[in-house]
Amino acid sequence: MNDLRDGRLNRREFLEGAAALGLACPRGAAAQPAGGTLTYASTALPPSIEPHMQGLDIWQQRKPLIYENLIWVDEALDAKPELAETWEQRSPTEYVFHLRRGVRFHDGKELDAEDVKYTYDRVRDPKVSPGANDLLVIKSIDVPDAHTVRVVLHAPAATFLINLGGKYNGVVPAGSAGDGRALLTRAIGTGPFSVEEFDPSRRLVLKRHAAYWGRTKPALERVVFQAIPDESSIVAGLRTGQVTMAQFGSAPSFRVAKSVATLQTIQAPSTRWVVLDLAGDMEPTSKIEVRQAITLAIDRAAILQIAGAGLGQRLGVLPPGMKSWALPWQELPNAQRDVARARALLQKAGYTGRVSMKIRNIVGFPALAATLPVIVDNLREAGIDVQVETVDGGVWIKDWIVPQSPPTMNEWGGFVDPDQAFHRHFHSAPGGKDFRRWNNKKADELLDAGRATLERARRKHIYDQVQRLMAEDPITIPLYSPDLLYAMQKSVKGFTPHPTGFLYGLRWVSL
């Protein structure tokens, strides 16, 4: 078969073509002098910069500036070439990737096929990466020569190319992970920026990669990701100019920033979802009736208006940003609030008095903090008393790995296909992580069928069934899909949001 690119220009290809022709373009390479430092504020930073072992989106959003993959997923959610310049599908289960020449890592080493093999072999090891599930379909990775990678699959897989650009990947030099801890604080990627400084409590400083392979070079000299504990202080920093740009997790702060005359703002739909993850092996949520009662007790329309200030979308299971894959919430069971039915289900589960449960909140996520009080009030009305436990991201990651986390407020994102959203998270072990401990055999069967099916209409039918099953037997309660909310100085030029929330757009920004 021919190279699988579809002939449409993505943003990177357009910018590179414009640069080659000497045309002015948003990144400012021709029209504006390169340089300057962009300070990007957020309420938290990742606990490490390890590329393959953590799923926190606060890291994954920043990772594309440092690390690259064979494939990247563009704004239209299509697979596009990155470190693989071209590829061929020689059979339903065999792909051959031809690497770009002259690509250098941040330490000066030239990229070769052994680096690619090392990286993807590492990520597909479930002892190393929570992203291993996405690559289980790979049977073998071979290196015919220094610039060619051959991948053989166990079976045809509709999402194979998309998953090569998944958020748990990131090509590193062969052997660079050492005993498994070497990359926790030292990043070695091929991306347009390298890590100059990292202090998880204060800031992550990136410096322009002078030897970057792209014809379009980064305009910024540095990007500083600054930790500022609360969003009101971030707004103050934007007012004074100490902060160049920020993404807001709470709509009220965004609306304040929008009122500042010296700032520009962007609001865009996303593939993100704010959820309440339950625990299938912990009382009281081990009982399906309790999980259904919690679902029915929660007023999701109120959460969107109160916590999201209306700047988002109500959802059924998948976020509307995933387009035709997402069933409208009106088509799913248990979607409307019904407190009387919730109380009846608690009695059916054997609870004659009030029910107690713990809900964990992760610090540094304003959308979660704004949502939780509404949930606590809703559940109290239905007869459930909530004890709130606040933990940092490091504690959550440890419990997620085991897994042993109690019901937890979460914000998920970065998924561009339902296989990514469902198989890794909801398929029982060892096929998936299933960190909520759902252990639903019907879901396993459907998710395996969805992964093995190539025809889109049949896949759509399968994933519609998955969404209905998740609404009938809830192990996670999707609450709303927040819009992407950015505020920045008017000097910032050329930023394009990505529906996943990942900061690809910062690669070509100028000041």
Image: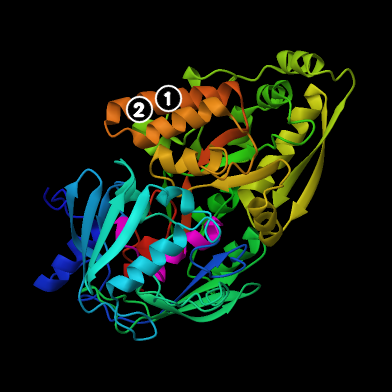
Give the residue type that dot 2 points to.
Answer: Lys
Residue 438 rendering spot, x and y as whole percentages: 63, 34
> Is the C terminus in the top left, top right, bottom left or bottom right quadrant?
bottom left
Residue wearing tag 1: 464
The quarter holding residue 194 reads bottom left
361 over 184 or under it: above or below: above
Location of residue 292 with respect to 34 vertically, above or below? above
Q: Secondary structure at mark 1?
A: helix
Which residue is rendered at x = 23% and y = 53% of the image?
95
Q: Residue at the location (58% across, 62% down)? A: 235
Q: Position of residue 69 (x, y in %)?
A: 34, 63
Q: Nearer the viewer, residue 143 or 401?
A: 143
* Picture quadrant where residue 41 is located: bottom right
Q: Which residues are magenta?
A: 54-72
Mark 2, other Cα within 10 Å: few <14 / some 14–19 / many ≥20: some
* Badge 2 vs badge 1, beta-carbon distance below 8 Å: yes
User: Does 361 lie within the magenta span?
Assistant: no
Q: Position of residue 214 (x, y in %)?
A: 24, 73
Specify the amino acid type for callout 1: Asp
| Residue position for label 2 | 460
